[in-house]
Image (spheres, rainbow, N blue to C red):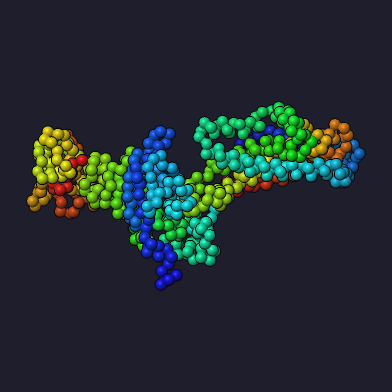
């Protein structure tokens, strides 16, 4: 009991420290002032209207959503297949293959971005959504492999054998037995793939060019050239959206544990 | 349905599949798990592969099912080789060790699974599921999920799922291993009944000798990747061919000694300070070393018998345990050989005391050379 009050205080301070920037940005986003100032003189939806009235901001938003959706489709299928294959490899090969697949998590983002930039500039993939999707897929696959791998660890391979003995083709056994049972892991992986792509800035700085400016990229540019509270409104919306997705992932994981 | 025969019961008319294994081999990274198994399983037979863990019995079953590829030899079902045929095209029912029921499907969906793969329409599926559940005595359990069932019930569902598509061959991999003794015994009888009802071929894998003896038409005792002995339960029990079979299938007393001579099919040997006789499959040369084997329940105390038959041996009681239906004695022969004797208990049999010197007697026919 003696430890309780200091622990509570410490925890509150840490949470406050973590939440303060978000609270400040949210407050500023509802400001009525024409410039970034705190505390806001009055509240209003002026900057949300500015965001929704800007073709550039909306185009970037839709591009980011589109790139993230394509990344989810690609990374989730590739990652799930990779996780399945990893489970079937002999131990030594599995360790090597897993290290290779997970390397984008370990290599510094800027290094990955430069590497991708050099390769893609040769293939004309700069300033194209395709380039962004491919690069983001590389970054998102590790998350899918990790979460599907965790689901597979609890999956009894004999269920697959049972399905095969009962007349299911390899694909039929996967679709009717394996996939439904590892679905929570696949969905969590898909959510992380979406967030990875949707929030991604470093690779976008190199690959966006002028033709494919994603939302994080436009926020970055906006901060550098014109500071007005629109960015706060966009940031607040992005945070709310991401929080919703993470909440969804949490619920899925809860269900998977049951 | 013609003549009121249910489709499942009708497979009985089509009888079971025959299986032949020819010099079957399986090596894992160079190590032989199955090292040349040859076996003819007749249509409609209940054959058990019995052996300790790691003997190769499960690997053999997995090769018949198609989950392992043989490193050598051949597997034929109904005279046609199935090597290279993927498991889903072999049309073999299989019951797995921990049931392997699909946890996300209901009992009805689990049992309907093989029918769905075969394109059976929804209405027929429901009828067949109901029949299969009746056959394993679980009527009305369609809507439950596997996790809501007891172990024994899950096993029955697994069985129903494995036979609902009318395979002519059913493979079972230690299906009763996870159940308690009483449930195991009642399910053993039920498996026998099911085997008789269906008339299909059963290949059963177990390490439990009692299970094997109770259910099988024939038992193949597997050891170190080979068949040590093949035969009907009684034949294996009464005439084990070697020490491994004699001790793995039931309990045995071994007496070692030297051959004195032969009398028509019977060897005369000096063991543990006595002259003993035993059934010998082939002639043995005088002076050769020999081991005789006898079951503990076939040995008796000579003074309790009206006319003591055959072999006699003096030994000292070193341990006496009353175990309800019988008394279990441990005795030491004059040469130090330890012997177990199981005497059926009754209120009138005299209990032997530790330290007492007794004369054991048992028939020559219950003594075999191993």
Point out the residue furthest to the right here.
A34
In the rendered image, residue B330, in percent from the top left (x then y), is placed at: 20, 41
**Nearer to the camera, B352 or B137:** B137
Image height of A80 relative to A165, above or below: above
Task: Give the residue displayed 58% in from the left and 48% down from the top.
Answer: A179
Which quadrant holds residue A122? top right
Q: Nearer the viewer, residue A231 or A208?
A: A208
Name the residue: 61% across, 31% down. A100
Residue B211: x and y, percent? 32, 51
Q: Seen in the image, is A3 located left or right of residue B308?
A: right
Q: Percent x, y for residue B340?
A: 20, 42
Which of the 4 image quarters holds residue B370? top left
Instruction: Tell me the residue at 37%/58% (across/down).
Output: B16
Q: Residue at x 33, y 38 (%)?
A: B224
Left or right, B53 with respect to A24, comes to: left
Check the image and name the residue furthest to the bottom.
Answer: B3
**Rendered-image quadrant of the N terminus of chain A:** top right
Determine if residue A202 is in view.
no
From this view, report whether residue B256 is shown above or below residue B5.
above
Q: Is residue B145 left or right of residue B320?
A: right
Image location of residue B360, percent across then percent down? 13, 44
Q: Is B219 situated left or right of A22 in this image? A: left
The image shows a total of numbered marks equal to 0
For this rendering, which residue is in front, A226 or B26? B26
Using the rendered image of the protein, determine whether residue B84 is visible from the camera's viewpoint.
yes
Q: Nearer the viewer, residue B313 or B233?
A: B233
């Amino acid at each position: 009991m003696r430890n309780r009050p200091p622990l509570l205080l410490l925890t509150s301070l840490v949470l406050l420290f973590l939440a303060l920037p978000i609270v400040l940005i949210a407050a500023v986003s509802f400001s009525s002032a024409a410039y970034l100032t705190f505390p806001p003189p009055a509240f209003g939806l002026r900057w949300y209207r500015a965001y929704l009235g800007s073709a550039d901001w909306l185009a970037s938003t839709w591009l980011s959503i589109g790139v993230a959706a394509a990344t989810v489709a690609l990374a989730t299928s590739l990652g799930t297949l990779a996780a399945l294959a990893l489970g079937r490899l002999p131990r030594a090969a599995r360790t090597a293959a897993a290290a290779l697949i997970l390397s984008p998590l370990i290599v510094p983002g800027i290094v990955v971005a430069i590497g991708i930039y050099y390769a893609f500039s040769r293939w004309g993939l700069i300033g194209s959504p395709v380039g962004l999707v491919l690069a983001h897929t590389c970054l998102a696959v590790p998350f899918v492999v990790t979460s599907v791998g965790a689901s597979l660890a609890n999956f009894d391979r004999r269920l697959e054998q049972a399905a095969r003995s009962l007349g299911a083709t390899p694909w039929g056994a996967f679709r009717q037995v394996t996939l439904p049972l590892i679905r929570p892991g696949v969905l969590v992986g898909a959510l992380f793939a979406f967030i990875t792509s949707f929030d991604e800035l470093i690779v976008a700085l190199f690959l966006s060019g002028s033709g494919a400016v994603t939302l994080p990229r436009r926020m970055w540019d906006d901060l550098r050239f014109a500071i007005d509270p629109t960015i706060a409104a966009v940031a607040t919306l992005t945070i709310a959206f991401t929080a919703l997705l993470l909440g969804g992932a949490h619920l899925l994981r809860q269900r998977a544990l049951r | 349905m013609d003549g009121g025969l249910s489709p499942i019961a009708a497979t009985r008319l089509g009888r079971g599949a025959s299986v032949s294994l020819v010099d079957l081999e399986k090596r894992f990274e160079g190590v032989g798990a199955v090292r040349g198994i040859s076996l003819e399983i007749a249509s409609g037979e209940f054959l058990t592969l019995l052996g300790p863990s790691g003997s190769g019995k499960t690997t053999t079953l997995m090769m018949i099912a198609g989950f392992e590829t043989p490193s050598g030899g051949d597997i034929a079902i109904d005279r046609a080789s199935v090597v290279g045929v993927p498991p889903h095209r072999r049309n073999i029912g299989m019951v797995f060790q921990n049931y392997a029921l699909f946890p996300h499907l209901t009992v009805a969906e689990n049992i309907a699974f093989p029918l769905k793969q075969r394109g059976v329409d929804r209405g027929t599926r429901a009828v067949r599921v109901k029949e299969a559940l009746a056959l394993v005595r679980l009527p009305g359990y369609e809507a439950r999920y596997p996790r809501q069932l007891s172990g024994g019930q899950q096993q029955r569902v697994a069985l129903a799922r494995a036979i609902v598509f009318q395979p002519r061959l059913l493979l079972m991999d230690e299906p009763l291993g996870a159940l308690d003794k009483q449930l195991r015994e009642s399910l053993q009888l039920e498996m026998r009944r099911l085997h008789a009802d269906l008339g299909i071929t059963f290949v059963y894998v177990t390490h439990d000798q009692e299970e094997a003896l109770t259910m099988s038409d024939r038992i193949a005792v597997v050891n170190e990747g080979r068949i040590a002995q093949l035969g009907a339960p009684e034949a294996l029990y009464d005439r084990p061919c070697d020490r491994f079979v004699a001790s793995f299938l039931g309990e045995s007393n071994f007496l070692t000694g030297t051959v004195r001579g032969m009398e028509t099919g019977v060897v005369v040997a000096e063991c543990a300070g006595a002259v003993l006789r035993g059934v010998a499959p082939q002639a043995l040369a005088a002076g050769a070393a020999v081991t005789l084997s006898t079951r503990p329940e076939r040995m008796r105390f000579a003074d309790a018998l009206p006319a003591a038959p055959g072999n006699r041996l003096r030994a000292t009681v070193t341990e006496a345990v009353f175990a309800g239906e019988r008394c279990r004695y441990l005795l030491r022969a004059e040469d130090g050989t330890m012997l177990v004797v199981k005497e059926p208990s009754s209120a009138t049999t005299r209990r032997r005391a530790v330290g007492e010197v007794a004369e054991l007697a048992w028939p020559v026919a219950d003594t075999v050379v191993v």
